[in-house]
Amino acid sequence: MERDILIEELEQKLDSFDSAERKQALSALCEKVRAGEITLPEPGTDVNLHCHTFFSYNSYGYSPSKFAWLARRRGLAVAGVVDFDVLDALEEFLEAARMLGLKGCAGLETRVFVPEFSDRVMTSPGEPGITYHMGVGFPSAKLQGRLKEFLLNLRKTAQQRNRDLMGRVNKHLRPVELDYERDVLVLTPSGNPTERHICLAFSRKAREIFDDDNALQQFWSEKLGVEGKSLELPEGRELLNTIRAKTMKRGGVGYVVPDKGSFPLMADTNRFVLAAGGIPTMTWLDGTSDGEKAIEELLEVGRAAGAAAINIIPDRNYGVGPGDEKVENLYQVVELAQKLHLPVVVGTEMNSPGQKFVDSFDSEELSPLVPVFLKGAHIVYAHSVLQQKCGLGYTSDWAKKNFESVAEKNEFFQMLGSTLEPEKEDKLSTLSEDVTAKEILDKISN
């Protein structure tokens, strides 16, 4: 019992805002694994390459180290972190993955403007021309020059947008008003709060001001225009989601319609991702928007601008039954991705309360797609390692020269990702641009 309590305490320390405390806790847990006090399972076939950490927003407060630890304890085949507008989690997550023998990768998510779809909604509800977009498999967060400037501008723009948003919502929620530095920035370890942090801060500020349950319920009922009893006060999932929906999204008092200058162009973002060593990745929501109904055209535009993979959140697209429209849309977009040889990246986000740690891949709807999802994960992992160790990743000049087709390239990176063990990653450090694909596979098999 005492041993279990100690392990639980160490796991809690993995979420500390103190990076030294996180690293010390992870080292202690790894020592317990080596001592036989903790048994880690063999990796299975489950993957999650889209987990947000507390460097943007994770509803469970997970740090990069915590997600790596839990992913290894759950036996994930591949795991990856993705944060909004920053690469702050990258170095810590990849180091933790190496310590744990976990196949890992890291990236970022942002929003971009697509001129060709300026009159159509895609993945950002109610916002024509705007879509969520990603880069996966970045080899490093230590960028220089114009790449560093581009990344910093993503953060700067997002934070100014949040400050302006908070100011507008403050006026509506008086006397519950936030101070950005005192109430919002303290909720994140590196100064990158999101809308969801602001929602949490508002819920906590309201609790401070209205310590009477009835008064708190009446306040939120009046301000949000909903029945207060249904809001899971003082800071439950329903309240946080309702604050965001009623005050920050389209139609809300804090919402301002973005224009084409509010976000970077998708093509510019793709150039940044490629130059930084990542894989530019389009996102897909559920196939119901006007833009996503023209998915073949949308993917053609994205690929012409440098996108080389597609991200899907499976958990949003099944559960009602095989005849559900979203399930059919899911199968169709996966089929199209395979036809275009686009690796499919999947995960559950965990940036909203109640989201799963990993998708239910054994469900009737998702089980047929597991090979596709696993293949995509192995491709991204192999790219991440090769790009980090020797600059020979999926989007490199070496890859362009050594494979006659994207299909052939996918097969190599899938094979490398599925057979490479994390403890052998360093074997790829000394490779030159003259190496062949076969020589790489031979090297890790010895």
Image (spheres, grey):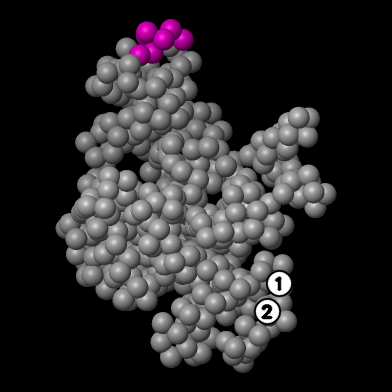
Considering the whole magenta stretch, tell me its main secondary structure. Answer: helix
- Which element is circle 2 on? helix
Amino acid identity at mark 1: Lys
Residue at (68% x, 83% y) in the render: 443
User: Which residue is at the front of the view, 167 or 43?
Assistant: 43
Read off the residue under disc 1.
Answer: 424
Q: Are marks 1 and 2 in contact (CB under 8 Å)?
A: yes
Q: Quadrant of residue 293?
A: bottom left
Q: Marks 1 and 2, how far apart in space?
A: 7 Å
Above or below for 390 versus 319: below
Read off the residue under disc 2.
Answer: 444
- Which label number is shown at residue 362? none
Residue at (27% x, 48% y) in the render: 321
Is residue 1 visible to us here?
yes
Amino acid identity at mark 2: Ile
Q: In the picture provided, is 201 more to the left or to the right than 20?
A: left
Q: In the picture provided, is 257 more to the left or to the right than 356?
A: left
Residue at (41% x, 87% y) in the render: 405
Residue stretch in magenta: 211-217
